[in-house]
Amino acid sequence: MYKIVILGSGAAPGVPAIAMGWGNCNPENPRNFRTRTTTYFEYNDTKLLIDTSPDLRGQMLQNGITSLSAVLYTHSHADHLHGIDDLREINRINHGSLDVYGSDDTVRVIKQRFPYLVATPQKANNVSMQPSLVANVVNYYEPFYINNLKIVPIRLLGHAVPSTGYIFNDGEIVYVADYRKLEDKALEFIKKDVELAIFPMTTTKGSEFHAGLNEILQDIKRLGCKKAIINHMAAECDYDVVKTITPENVEPAYDNMLITVD
Ligand SMILES: [Zn+2]
């Protein structure tokens, strides 16, 4: 059984945005209030975060998250990464380090930007003073396990920095982060029906570094997703409008949206 909570459904500026305000979003609809991208992912006893947005503290408090097995990172942009210091609270609860996973590019940037939080499996940091994270490099298309959860990292093409998606348990759940295009090779690793896929959008028309709605809907079909969630939306995307222009099996995300898959 999977339990997934979209802790933050917004693109980098969040909604409302400091510069743009509510944009095209109806401020009366609470589903248009969006913090930045973090996703909570639970499978049996395995509890993960995918990314740690700058809004992480509020997201964890609001959802009562006090226990994590690990964190998966998709890429090094600030809106996905810069809440990383708040993981210290998990270190304090665990009295030890926490494993984080990312591609070699992402892990390199984490170590450059936040050298003080890097620990080793042998030696944790002093968690009353700083976070204590053990960085694990994952290779594209090489499966790895966290407890009994099988994870295959996939390469996402066309974003401004290298970006990684994750296939869980041979495709039961697929998580796509900022991207323009899926690499064909990723499809080889989907061996089961895709019960749920999560895609990022930013704006419906797309841009140089982000797929637009048409491209995303094509990918949802290509993967044969039973259900898909459109996540990571900017102030251009009103919840009700996106819901109206997407097929029945596709739903826009909102903060604290809970999805369970048996
Ligand atoms: Zn982003």
Image: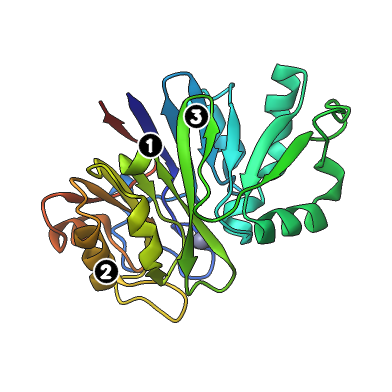
Q: Is residue 50 above or below residue 235?
A: above
Mark 2 and mark 1 in contact? Answer it, CB < 8 Å: no
Q: Which mark is residue 169?
A: 1
- Sort mark 2 into few (<14), some (14-19) or many (20+) by Cα contacts within 10 Å: many
Residue under the image location 60 percent in, 33 percent down: 70
Q: Nearer the viewer, residue 65 or 109?
A: 109
- Specify the amino acid type for callout 2: Leu
Q: Are marks 2 and 3 in contact (CB under 8 Å)?
A: no
Report how far apart the C-alphas of labels 1 and 3 lie in the structure.
Answer: 28 Å
Q: CA distance from mark 2 to mark 3?
A: 30 Å
Quarter holding the N terminus?
top left
113 horizontally vs 257: left or right? right
Residue 106 position within the rendered picture, expressed as x and y whole percent measured from the top left: 66, 57
Q: Secondary structure at mark 2?
A: helix
Sequence-wise, the earlier of marks 1 and 3 is 3
Residue 213 has which mark?
2
Q: Residue 100 or 129: which is nearer the viewer?
A: 100
Which mark identifies residue 62?
Answer: 3
- Which residue occupies 40% across, 67% down? 183
Q: Would you say the residues marked 1 and 3 are in contact, meaning their CB atoms lie under 8 Å apart? A: no
